[in-house]
Amino acid sequence: MSNFIVKKVAVLGAGVMGAQIAAHCVNAKVPVVLFDLPAKEGPKNGIVLRAIEGLKKLSPAPLGNKDDAACIEVANYDDGLELLKGCDLIIEAIAERMDWKHDLYKKVAPFIAPDAIFASNTSGLSITALSDGFAAELKARFCGVHFFNPPRYMHLVELIPTATTRPEILDQLEGFLVTTLGKGVVRAKDTPNFIANRVGVFNMLATIHEAEKFGLSCDLVDDLTGAKLGRAKSGTFRTADVVGLDTLGHVVKTMQDTLGDDPFAACYKTPEILTRLVAAGALGQKTGAGFYKRVGREVQRLDFASGQYVAGGGKADDLVVRILKEKDAAKRMKALRDSGNPQAQFLWAIFRDAFHYIAVHLEAVADTPCAGASARSWVRSKPGRRRAGSRSPTGSRKTSTPAKPCVRRRCRPGCSTDAAACMPPTAPGRRHARPMCRVPLSPSTAASRSAPRFWARAQPTAARAARRCSRTNRYASGIRATRC
């Protein structure tokens, strides 16, 4: 297992996330087989075939080349389970129902190879509870691997172990996610909704509450909470539509069911407008209507008061735009707090609530502040530029050299510790430049390194190393990496 290589991936579930995870594996030239239930009518693999056809129509495009859809192998749970024996990584991505997942696990467990990693793409269910009923040997190879929608473009992936997951399993899976799929990985604790969803969904609920309080429309809120804050331009309500309002409802329900003693429990109430939309079958992008609806070439927004779709186009006030352009974060926050503008007061309210929530709960959801900060940053990062010239695994067009992991030098001259031992124990395989060495410095070296001249010389070198790291590790799908 020390030379673990993922030669083939199986994805269980051809829904919105499962199909796109399979597409991203194909983008990275990794063979993949996509499973789902046998169809009741027509071809037995009809559900999977329709999901693959749907990939070609999605926006943003999950495939670098639409022809690569043909490279996804199709299977169903009745006839194709023998294919699992040839897979090194199996990712379950079916609906967020604990009972459905357990039923599926009982069916597939006998066909999982002895050295394969088994992972669930759940967005918030307990990984420990999901592993109940597994044999001890399979429990040691089971963990959570949480991709974010759309998986080709969202940099963040959360890894969630159980108490019985072997550490090397996480290291091997993180290596595949980083070097082959081009992702940024954080280790999360097995708590409800993990890190990004725990904080992000609270922030989304707080944003919806404050928008209703200040009487702001969803298009105006998205303009305020999108690119102007350095986040994805989809903002809040458009992001909810992309994720799926039913999925959002499941995540909120998980928080309500499992966080009853949380001091913020009152904030986890499902917004009335979300309940109405889900009940009406308006689930967002997947159904063509949610907080937004496309009518011809026009994208209309939902009017909260009437429940009808009306013309959008709301924009932030010039005063608020000028405040958000302030480079000093402290001055920017003070200006928002002191302003009498309703939009500025709205932004101050959602920042205040988010900072308070993170300060209270960070220790419970992550081992280090770095993991929490990376999750918040990467889940909201914008995709970079796409490179042309991707080809299918069976095609002939020339492609760039596959991404290689960073090669870390010894942390300092004379250090007898290898790079792995110099890395912090909670972050194996992380790509940071110049990892901190735990071997004590000699007195003379420590004295020389405390001098200002040393740091003036060392800091540019570290900056160059970080830039080199960012250039080396690229998204496997053709998306340029934006950070180390």
Image (tube, helix red, strand yellow):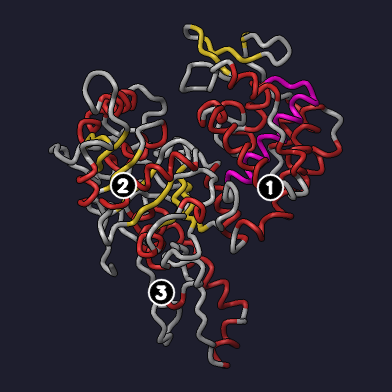
- Mark 1 to mark 2 CA distance (whole Å): 31 Å
In whole angstroms, how far apart are the C-alphas of marks 3 and 1? 37 Å
Lateral position of residue 227 relative to residue 341, left or right: left
Badge 1 amino acid: Leu
Task: Check disc 2 and report its element: helix, strand or loop.
Answer: helix
* Dominant SS type (magenta): helix
| Residue at point 44%, 39% (across, down) | 100
| For discs 3 and 1, the disc positioned in front in the rendered view | 1
Asked if disc 3 and disc 2 are in contact, CB closer than 8 Å, the reply is no
Residue 362 included in the magenta stretch of the image: no
> Could you say whether the residue bearing mark 3 is in a helix, strand or loop?
helix
Can residue 468 be seen by looking at this rendering?
no
Q: State the separation of the CA atoms marked 3 and 2.
A: 35 Å
Image: magenta residue range: 196-217
Q: Residue at x 56, y 19 (%)?
A: 290
Against 289, residue 13 (above or below) is below
**Closest to the observer: 228 or 97?**
97
Please tell me the numbered disc located at residue 259: 1
Instruction: Please state which amino acid type lies under the numbered disc 2.
Output: Val
In the image: residue 119, left or right of residue 34: right
Q: Which residue is mark 2?
A: 108
Residue 331 spot, x, y in % from top left = 78, 46
Q: Is residue 214 magenta?
A: yes
Q: For label 1, count other residues whose C-alpha is less than 10 Å away and answer few (under 14), some (14-19) or many (20+).
A: some
Q: What percent of the width, then of the height, locates residue 88?
A: 27, 54
Q: Which mark is residue 420?
A: 3
